[in-house]
Amino acid sequence: MNDQLRPMTEADIADERARFPQAFSRSPKELALLWAVWGGGTALTAYCLYRFGFFSGGFTGGMMKFASVVVVQLFPPKGFEQLPTFLMVIGETLAMAFLGTILGAAMAFPLSFLASKNMMPFRPIQFGARRFADLLRSFDYLIWALIFVRAIGLGPLAGIMAIAIVETGTFIKLYSEIIENLDRKQMEGIRASGGNWLQAARFGVLPQVLPMMLSNTLYMFEHNTRSASILGIVGAGGIGFLLSDRLRAYELEEACLIIILVILTVYAIDYLSTILRQRFIRGQAETGKLATHKPSPPAASAGSLRN
């Protein structure tokens, strides 16, 4: 016992190093592979930077010109007399992001169960749902906005549909991964007590996955607000149309005011979504603690679960 508690000496360390050499140093093959990976990655990065002109004088001059445009031509912001119009269009942008996010989440929620391996044992359906999600999110918002502008005309409806289509694919992937990582013991306990598949999903799956689904949905709403800000460039409504119009007319001071309003809007959404996430998740955690401190009720029968 005392021999186990004594401090290790240099001789002990040398003995352990001889017994387990892989724990103290990499083999020559591993070192060669490590250097090859890092060296190849560094060489590829340097080549790409050189190939696209990062080391040229044009890039340096362009950055200096960009700095002068930002500092000299954008500031100070102007157009405060048009602030009511800007705020009204930002409200339209928020509505586009909100409706697109809600529609995408609503369409993705049932499909995410089909895309989850632990909820859909029939592999062709699960594989098809995953590939369908990949198809929807393979194209950017602007591509879908161009398609919907062509199909249903100019206006915010095209932007809402573009956001909803992309978010359906994104939420299917996010929600299905959340469902696949849940604790199966609650669901298995309900099934063992006589509950059917719907009851297992309602009482064993949803309480675990809803907080994370809400967190992801709130984050994507913030992301979609930024995306909706540029959809107006292709005629899909929102503040992007006014921003692109000011930039094309070289009214950079008014464009600066629009950019500041968009940034403040994103800050506000991020702050509010953080509060909602914390309160909702804290409430779920407190509910779980109360449930664990309550005395265990008698085991439910299959008949009571069915009723």
Image (tube, helix red, strand yellow):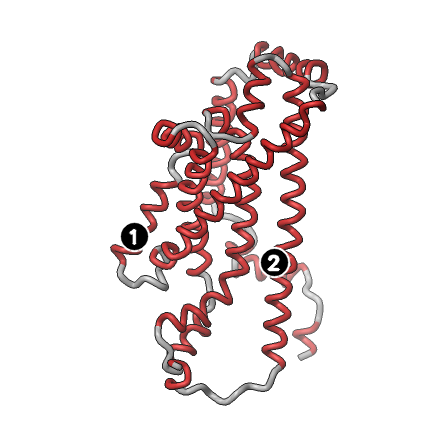
Mark 2 neighbour class, 10 Å CA radius: few under 14, some 14 to 19, many 20 or more: few
Q: Amino acid at mark 1?
A: Phe
Q: Is residue 80 left or right of residue 206?
A: right
Q: Is residue 138 left or right of residue 64?
A: left
The residue tagged with tag 2: helix, strand or loop?
helix
Earlier sequence position, callout 2 versus callout 1: 2
Where residue 122 sits, quadrant-wise, is bottom left
Residue at image coords 57%, 39%: 94
Q: x%, y% of residue 295?
A: 59, 86
Residue at image coords 63%, 44%: 269
Mark 1 neighbour class, 10 Å CA radius: few under 14, some 14 to 19, many 20 or more: some
Q: Amino acid at mark 2?
A: Ala
65 relative to 299, above or below:
above
The residue tagged with tag 1: helix, strand or loop?
helix
Q: Is residue 190 left or right of residue 278?
A: left
Q: Which mark is residue 14?
A: 2
Residue at image coords 64%, 37%: 265
Q: Quadrant of the N terminus?
A: bottom right
Towards the viewer: 193 or 99 = 99
Where residue 6 sits, quadrant-wise, is bottom right
280 relative to 299, above or below:
above
Q: Which mark is residue 127?
A: 1
Q: Which tag is nearer the camera, tag 2 or tag 1?
A: 1
Gap in Å between the C-alphas at discs 2 and 1? 53 Å
